[in-house]
Image (cartoon, coloured by chain):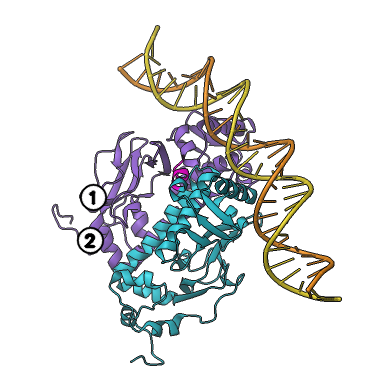
Chain colours: A cyan, B purple, C yellow, D orange
Amino acid sequence: MPRKSKTLTIDDIKVSCSSCSLAELCLPHGMNEKELDELDKIVVRHQPYQPGEHLFRAGDEFRSVASVRTGCFKSYVIDHEGQEQVLGFHLPGEIIGLDAIHSCKHTANVVALDTSAVCGLTFDTVTNMARHMPELQNELFRVMSQRISELETIAGDLSADERIAMFLLSLSDRFSRRGYSDKEFILAMSRRDIASYLRLATETVSRVLARFQKAGVVKVDRKQVQILDIDELRTIARKS
Amino acid sequence: MPRKSKTLTIDDIKVSCSSCSLAELCLPHGMNEKELDELDKIVVRHQPYQPGEHLFRAGDEFRSVASVRTGCFKSYVIDHEGQEQVLGFHLPGEIIGLDAIHSCKHTANVVALDTSAVCGLTFDTVTNMARHMPELQNELFRVMSQRISELETIAGDLSADERIAMFLLSLSDRFSRRGYSDKEFILAMSRRDIASYLRLATETVSRVLARFQKAGVVKVDRKQVQILDIDELRTIARKS
DNA sequence: CGGCAAATTGACTCCACTCAAAGGAGGTGG
DNA sequence: CCACCTCCTTTGAGTGGAGTCAATTTGCCG
């Protein structure tokens, strides 16, 4: 049934959303998972990204939206002092690149932290889809408003303990949504990246994690994290 | 030409964008200013809002998007400790209420700080417009991405001096875009509101403004602000 | 002229940053 | 296989900027 070389149309996309995590963008809106690989063949880069390899860089023309299939990415900008500022982490199932929707240029750099794979849609495909599918339009709004919530959290007047607790809970939640364990996971990012993202010093991240561990809330071994008392973590996050 | 009672259609909106600041939403996309008051009669509340009066409250159903005509509003939420958290200020020409686009419920409270007037479009009108007009869709994206930039600024690792300097520059810029003086303006909001918005203590706002005044950068008298050395203010804002 | 809330000013405290140094972990080459 | 290097992480000691607490002062409105 799948034909080899064929021009992609809106209808194709409607019925052939890939099995990859881009499904999150499509499936909630009446699409099915048939013809899984057809779309992939058109839009996916098959070689995985290696740690340190960039998906795109600030200023790049907006060619596509990507969804993480496996691995982990971080997005960051370089501030006026030349310092790297981490804007976010992208786990499997999450969409990358919508920052470029308005200006048609990416505002952030996105780099793999792990061996990672993505799938994506070209810019034209996305805007055409959005034009013909009000549901997708809403989905794009949803992603943007998610980013706003994320920023509102970080912008809040929070202590270091609260920030770390919320960060761990956020990861836990996001992993569990994707079917991974919500109690035990790997921090693909460095302490430095976490610190930059949470607007803390790396030493503070280290100290807080050590304190949490001593209190029996989590067990941390290098990049491996185990949440021992998720309720206590929630209490800490809620300005205890 | 204007008829009294008439159902509003998409075409009407296309040709009858009001003269009020909602024009910012419409005019950049090929609309004109004819039939100024017709739309106003449908969507505008003619009585001005008094200081302390709410435009809408968190949880309200999303009925309309509003654009400030005159005066000033603040939006805020009440956090889990019962404390008011100011999210932003809305000056003439700026759009209020898009926070509700996805969930169809407002997430924030919006209250007048001054005697203020707005004009607005109903929810149905906005979503229909967006569906039929890709340009409007982009405009909505633009407003959301503006909010993201604003939050990124506040979320940044900034000193009290930097925050206040950026805040004053932002107001200056926004007033000048609307044809008001960029060097002298009124702070409709209280020190407490500014502090909450910038995540500082009220005392800190007071002290920093006093310090800026002593340094000859600004002249502050109660709510009246005069920028004396805008370049120095920019230097302070750029992490001097 | 009170009465009240907002704003200012001062004294003190504390949390997170900075500076500094001592472990690991992983990679490379001899 | 080990030595070495480098980067990341951890831990300790000290500092400082912004918060807190408290006392006035100022402006506003009845």
Please tell me how crowded label 2 is: few (under 14), some (14-19), or many (20+) other residues with Cα within 10 Å: few
**Mark closest to the chain's N terminus, 2 or 1:** 2
In the image, residue A236 lies in the stretch drawn in magenta: yes
Q: Which residues are magenta?
A: A234-240
Above or below, B154 against A70 in this view is above
Query: Quick one: SS at disc 1?
Result: helix
- Say whether residue B217 is left or right of residue D3: left
Query: Which is nearer the eye, A118 or B21?
Result: A118
The residue located at (51%, 62%) in the rendering is A185
Query: Which is nearer the eye, A233 or A239?
Result: A233
Residue B30 visible from this viewpoint: no
Query: Which is nearer the eye, A202 or B198?
Result: A202
Amino acid type at mark 2? Asp
Query: Quick one: SS at disc 2?
Result: helix
**Residue A88 screen position, x and y as percent:** 52, 59
Above or below, B133 against B104 in this view is below
**Residue A137 screen position, x and y as percent:** 34, 66
Q: Chain of mark 1?
A: B
In the image, residue B10 lies in the stretch drawn in magenta: no
Residue A85 visible from this viewpoint: yes
The residue located at (40%, 62%) in the rendering is A143
Picture quarter with the N terminus of chain B: bottom left
Amino acid type at mark 1? Val
Above or below, A13 against A95 in this view is below
Query: Which is nearer the eye, B34 or A28?
Result: A28
The image's mark for residue B110 is none
Q: Chain of mark 2?
A: B
- Say whether residue D4 is left or right of residue B71: right
**Residue B168 screen position, x and y as percent:** 53, 41
Q: Are marks 2 and 1 on the same chain?
A: yes
Tag 2 residue: B12
Tag 1 residue: B43
